[in-house]
Image: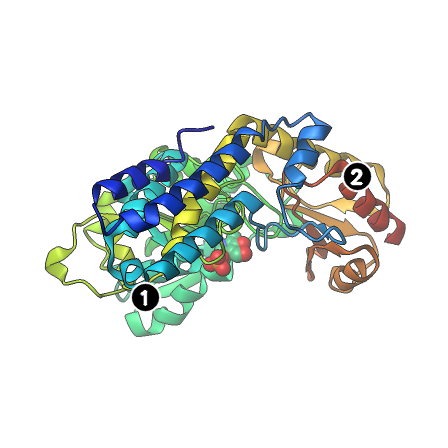
Amino acid sequence: MTDTCSSRRGFLKALAMGAVGAPILGRAQALEAALTSSLDGLSFRADSVSAVRRLRDQYLLSPDLIYLNHASIGTVPRPVVDAHIGYLELCETHPSLYVWGDVWRVLAEGVRAQAAALLKCEADDLAITHNTTEGFNVLAHGLPLSAGDEVLFSSINHAGAAVAWDTLAERRGFTVRRFPFPVERGAELTQEELVALHVQAVRPETRVLVIPHVDNMIGLRHPVREIAAAVRDRGVEYVFVDGAQSVGMIPVDIGSAGVDAYAMSPHKWVQSPKGLGLLYVSEALRSQLPRMWHKTAESRMDGTARDYEDYSTRAWPAVVALGDALAFQAALGAAEKDRRYRALWRRVRDRVDSEASLAWRSPVTWSLSSVIMAVEVVGRPAPELGPELLETEGAVVRSFGGGLNSLRVSPNLMTSEEELDRFLDALAARGA
Ligand SMILES: Cc1ncc(COP(=O)(O)O)c(C=O)c1O
């Protein structure tokens, strides 16, 4: 059992809070104990068929589905679901304590510390939000920009990191420019080309660059640190990263990335309850970026990223369960997770390469790739294939039309080789 499950420490602090916290403590400890024992039994190993099967048993996914859409929305493991339900029930035993009691806030601090450890940043730099989109709204609403300032991103940038800028540009006086990302050449792009692509797009008026760490179409792992350093040399002041698809799937080291803000959606690859986000805001940026929500008097704000989550009433049970999701992922082991993801990527890639009817559209090297994989079925429009595969195979994937014309295959650690092969057989049979 990993010691990152620091919500347990939070409960001990809650005990110290006295009688008002005590009624929830007994139940909470039982929930914690249940979670701990299920994590102890995981002993996940990337190369063990039985370990993958054991892991699969932890999920509620329908056995009728081949769920290859973890990039759209993740699925919460049963121990975390159970813990979450337990926290919800606890809330209902003392509802006003739920809203106003400090117990839940203390627990949330444990979650923040866990997230900071995973992301290699300070807990004070992290807000626990609702999703990536909210993070970008905070940035687009508050960043001190004015007429003549430009916000820049590529055409591969997701709506959640783009539309807030588009919508607020006119009102706030800044401009937004998209440069074309050569998604059709995604397979062959090198790190150097990726850096050059961003640097060449910068103009003297560009003050902000937004980049996805991992995009949602071809799963390209952007070289964030290199791009950030290069565009800063060209005068870009703020680099903001869309980490919706990275946290929980690939290693993230915000502390050394040289970026100002990093917004995340742990309901995807951390497999937390839905509607939970994280937002890193550097200390330097915080002094310029006002908060978006206002419930607490300005004089009581503390200048940390907590100021960006002044929501008043909120879903504390889900926030606490985020800590359990982080603990679950940590118990699997970062190295074993990476090995397993890489093995899944290799299996899909090798099979696609061996079939004349299939084409690989994601980066060809693992260092630039991820388990978000774009596969074209030659001669078949992807948007019509998606529903067909669901109907006939129970396979859940996302389709992208246009120049990419691909199915997005996004498995998870517990996806079996047998499921992947069954899906790929079905694809190969449909190609021209
Ligand atoms: C790359 C990327 N950015 C942002 C988002 C938006 O995430 P959310 O809806 O959690 O805000 C998504 C969702 O799929 C995404 O894939």
Q: Position of residue 188 (x, y in %)?
A: 65, 39
Q: Position of residue 359 (x, y in %)?
A: 77, 45
Q: Which amino acid type corresponds to the residue marked 1 in the rendered image?
A: Phe
Q: Position of residue 331 (x, y in %)?
A: 51, 31
**Please, which colouring scheme is shown?**
rainbow
Q: Which residue is most to the bottom?
A: 171
x 57%, y 46%: residue: 78
Can I make out residue 203 in this image? no
Q: Is ligand 1 less than 8 Å from the beta carbon at label 2?
A: no
Is residue 54 shown left or right of residue 300? right
Q: Position of residue 360 (x, y in %)?
A: 73, 43
What secondary structure is marked by label 2?
A: helix
x 45%, y 43%: residue: 31
Does 375 sit above or below residue 191?
Answer: below
- Location of residue 111 (image quadrant): top left
Q: Earlier in the sequence, mark 1 or mark 2?
A: 1
What secondary structure is marked by label 1?
A: loop
Closer to the observer: label 1 or label 2? 2
The residue that mark 1 highlights is: 174
- Location of residue 167 (image quadrant): bottom left
Seen from the viewer's position, the closer of residues 316 and 117 is 316
Is residue 92 shown left or right of residue 360? left
Does 325 sit above or below residue 390?
Answer: above
- Decide: few, some or many residues near mark 1? Use Cα within 10 Å; few <14, some 14-19, many ≥20: some
Can I make out residue 193 in this image? yes
The residue that mark 2 highlights is: 418
Query: Real-space Cα distance between discs 1 and 2?
Result: 51 Å
Q: Which amino acid type corresponds to the residue marked 2 in the rendered image?
A: Glu
Is residue 50 shown left or right of residue 225? right
Pointers 1 and 2 in contact (CB under 8 A)?
A: no
Does 175 sit above or below residue 40?
Answer: below
